[in-house]
Every structure is written in structure tokens, then in C-alpha cells.
Amino acid sequence: MVNGRRRYDDFPAPVAGTEVHPQFDGRAVVAWLLADKIEVPMRPTVAYLTLAGTGGALFVTW
């Protein structure tokens, strides 16, 4: 959050906290990021889950 405030004039303003420990509205920050700072993939992505147990590792893909 600190870097966003320093680098971008349009970063959402704090809604609470102090100057040293500001608190931000999470929804406002996400909306700001989605507006033009990050790209959201338009196609499905592959996720992997690895579960480790006593019988070895189990890999799950979906």
C-alpha cells in the first residue's frame, strides 16, 4: 500500500488509521488495481494443488 501511495497520485485515500498506519478500503484498492494497474486473464487458468501426507504427495489439477 505504501508504494502505491508514493507512486500514484490517484491511489485511494486512507479511510481510517493514522499517518503512520493508514487503513484503506479494500474494495476501493481492488477497484483501483483493476481499473488499469493489473491485467485479469480472460481465459481459464490451470491451478495445481499439492497435498502431502504420510503416503506421499497427491497432485490435483483443475
Image (spheres, rainbow, N blue to C red):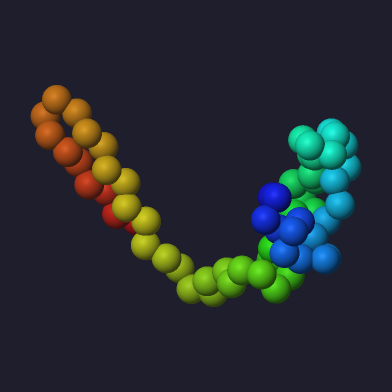
Q: Position of residue 33 (x, y in %)?
A: 69, 63
Q: Is residue 27 above or below residue 40?
A: above
Left or right: 56 as drawn, with respect to 37: left
Name of the residue lying farthest toward the left: 55
Q: Position of residue 48 (x, y in %)?
A: 32, 52
How many marks are shown on the rendered structure? 0
Q: Which quadrant: the C terminus?
A: bottom left
Residue name at image x 72 percent, y 64 percent? 7
Q: Position of residue 47 (x, y in %)?
A: 37, 56
Residue name at image x 48 percent, y 73 percent? 43
Q: Nearer the viewer, residue 29 or 19?
A: 19
Residue name at image x 79 percent, y 44 percent? 24
Q: Is residue 36 above or below residue 21?
A: below
Q: Position of residue 27 (x, y in %)?
A: 76, 50
Residue name at image x 54 percent, y 74 percent? 42
Q: Nearer the viewer, residue 22 or 52?
A: 22
Query: Which quarter of the picture shows residue 46?
Result: bottom left
Regarding residue 57, the answer to whether it shows in the image is yes
Regarding residue 31, the answer to whether it shows in the image is no
